[in-house]
Image: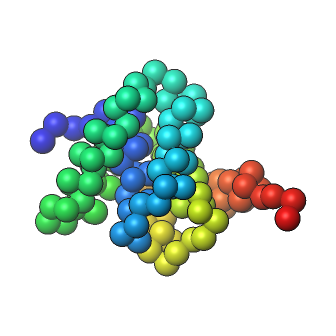
Amino acid sequence: MARPSTHEALIYLMVVTSASDRDMTDVELARIGAVIRTWPIFEDFDEERLIPVAQACQRLLHEEGGLERVIHLAVTVIPVHLHDTAYAAAFEVATADLEMRMEERRILQMLRQNLAVEDATSAAIERATKARHRTLT
């Protein structure tokens, strides 16, 4: 199997987070698309490739030890200076439907550990993301 690009690895982590509860909602998929369209890290990624990349990730997830393999693969591809960005992208997807399930929390914990995101950094990312998604009501 070919190693994913950095863009693909970032998408893998968003897909893993979305699929953690076995239900990739339209809201979560839309949020992945929004991240790809609006975050500078994806400015040179061909948006048309999103679906094939997400499908490749899903195929990997269905293999023996798929979740751990996908996370390990992504962590080895994503440069260390982008580990906090990877966590931020995953957290963005986890909060898309405004309901954080136990499975999503577990995946985020795994990502924090595997990406070696410090507690203060993850807390700042989480707080900023929640603040961005607040509404008046």
Residue at 41%, 71% (x, y): give it. Answer: 21
Q: Position of residue 16 (x, y in %)?
A: 37, 58
Q: Position of residue 88 (x, y in %)?
A: 57, 50
Q: Position of residue 97 (x, y in %)?
A: 59, 63
Location of residue 4 by image quarter: top left
Classify residue 50 as left or right of residue 28: left
Residue 78 or 50: which is nearer the viewer? 50
Residue extending furthest toward the front: 26
Q: Is residue 124 visible?
A: no
Q: Position of residue 40 (x, y in %)?
A: 57, 28
Residue extending furthest toward the right: 136
Residue extending furthest toward the top: 44
Q: Is residue 1 visible?
A: yes
Q: Quadrant of the N terminus?
A: top left
Q: Quadrant of the C terminus?
A: bottom right
Residue 106 or 72: which is nearer the viewer? 106
Classify residue 122 as left or right of residue 133: left
Residue at 71%, 59% (x, y): give it. Answer: 130
Residue at 19%, 62% (x, y): give it. Answer: 62
**In the depicted structure, whether residue 33 falls above or below residue 128:** above
Residue at 50%, 40% (x, y): give it. Answer: 33
Classify residue 75 as left or right of residue 127: left
**In the depicted structure, whether residue 22 falls above or below residue 34:** below
Residue 76 or 92: which is nearer the viewer? 92
Count of picture labels: 0
Question: By what rule are the colours in the image chosen?
Answer: rainbow
